[in-house]
Image (cartoon, grey):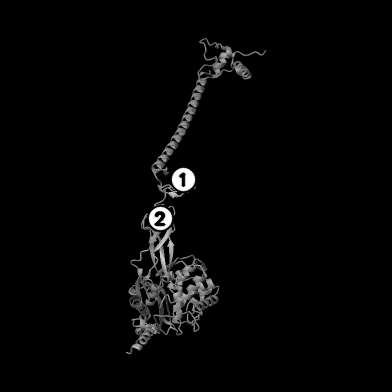
Amino acid sequence: MNKPLRPLCLLLCALLLVLAPSAALAEYNYEGLLTPNIIVIDAGDLAASNPIYERAADTKLYPASTTKILTCIVALENSSLDTQVTVGEEIKGLYELKNGYTENSSLMGLVQGETLSLRDLLYGLMLVSGNEAADAIAVAVGGTIENFVSMMNAKAAELGMSNSHFMNPNGVHSDEHYSTARDMAKLTAYALNNRDFAAIVRTGVYTVPANSVRQNELKLVNSNLLITAEDSPQYDSYPYAHCIGVKTGLTTKAGSCLIAAAEKDGARAIVCLYGDPIDTKGEQLQRFTNARGIFEDLFANVYTTVSGEALNLQTTFSCTVQRGRPEDLDENGQLTLTADISQLSIRGLPSELEQMQANPAAITTEIAWADSLAAPIRQGQWLGTVSYLYNGREIFSLELTAPKDVLEVAVLSPTNDASAPGDSDGQTTGGLLTEPTQSQPVKKGMSPFLVVLLVLLGILVVVVIVSALIAAQKRKRRRLRQQRRMQQQQQRRVQQTRPSGSAYGQAYGRGGSGGGARRDGTAAAERRSPSRQPSARNDGQAGARPAQRSGSGQAPQRTRSAQEQPRRRP
């Protein structure tokens, strides 16, 4: 070859490699696929302008239930997952097979009049492709189905889906409801960046609890066999460990449809397959086999890897630790953490990895710190997670752990004069928290043993006081019983010593009537002169009473002591 032409030939070869069809990059036998409409893109290609492979990607097609990807993202961006939705008459047509619905329409199992969260409806929308869930969501978010469809078309235009138009939120066939494989790839790449959307579509099974209107709970199993085959054990070979969603679709006009996404070592790919035949069950399942084969080839042959160290990533980070000892922290009072990237392998398209290596600054970091960063901290304790992002998309994340123990400061050092320098023994001025030294009084908290001892002493004191009060009450009751017993005994003695009525009359009168008159006179006199009444004493000494009768029958003489003599008025 002529030497002057050699540089020109090399330049032409380089241009051919750059401008070669995307199919030349892949070793997978795409020509063996019968699927009419295919596009395979890296998830970072939001415009789907540099596909890994494509076939009739801009041909008009019917998206069927993959429409619900747009329904879901519009609802997430215009409402809250916790919004309570009451299902109304918008789902009535489903059960009457109106408005294009057929007996084969996929349903979540809603009952008119029940209330549930928008979150539950979105899981019913994306996992089991509930058409009635789509209508309920449309009314809840847009007010009417028509208004929500307008929101869908506005979002499609915003994303550059220029060859798409939507007529309903569920994908029920309409000639004016159409899209393309490329437009649906753009939509999916955008939606996967929404964390709530990504969490929903990668879920295998979700349960909606029963309520007062619907008595049974709803078990929702993802129809994407690349995610789970829980209700179909005969399809256990279909789930793919790296699959992260997204949506299936199937109608007689659209054929068998699948949009799937998979992620491995930071590389994320999207496969869109439209129009496969649906005549047999085997034909309907072929979409899952095809998608899995494409993913396996992508991660093995199309995506390449580079070590984390080769990207010159930031690996050191600092955080402030509250109440940490100064000697356990750096000169700025912070703890330095290091992310271990020695075993890190990043997977991506060759061109993308070259750009990363050429411009490491394009890789940014976000750190989610632990709720509490305060001493004491133990070596190896988790303190946060650092995420590495390229073009706004997370490519991998690593945990940040404490490289050493960080002890808690013990006392508050005394504040010295501002002009006095710090002592050479490590004590600082200005009231900084430091570790106690022998020269500083150490304030220790009360020991647990002492606390227990004080509690026991307190209980003992209470027991003693209560026992004393109980004993005092018993003694008081005992004295009262003794007093009552003595009074009763004295009353019995008085009654025993008092003569009977007949004897008393014989002693003081001749006849019964006379004696009685005399007794009456005597009693009246005694009532007029209380001082003359004898008093009963506990010692048994009392005034003289007629207590005995002589043997001759004469009345005993009644005598009075000097104290009982009647007083005369002056």
Q: Which residue is mark 1?
A: 414
N-term-proximal mark, 1 vs 2 = 2
Q: Quadrant of the N terminus?
A: bottom left
Q: Position of residue 207 (x, y in %)?
A: 43, 67
Q: Which residue is mark 2?
A: 329
Q: Residue at x 48, y 30 (%)?
A: 477
Whether residue 214 sits left or right of residue 561 in the image: it is left
User: Residue 276, can we see it?
Assistant: no
What is the secondary structure assignment of the residue under circle 1?
A: loop
Q: Residue furthest top?
A: 552
Q: Residue at x 45, y 37 (%)?
A: 462
- The one of 530 and 242 positioned closer to us in this rendering: 242
Q: Position of residue 312 (x, y in %)?
A: 38, 68
Q: Quadrant of residue 467?
A: top left
Task: Report how far apart the C-alphas of labels 1 and 2 lie in the structure.
Answer: 22 Å
Q: Amino acid at mark 1?
A: Pro
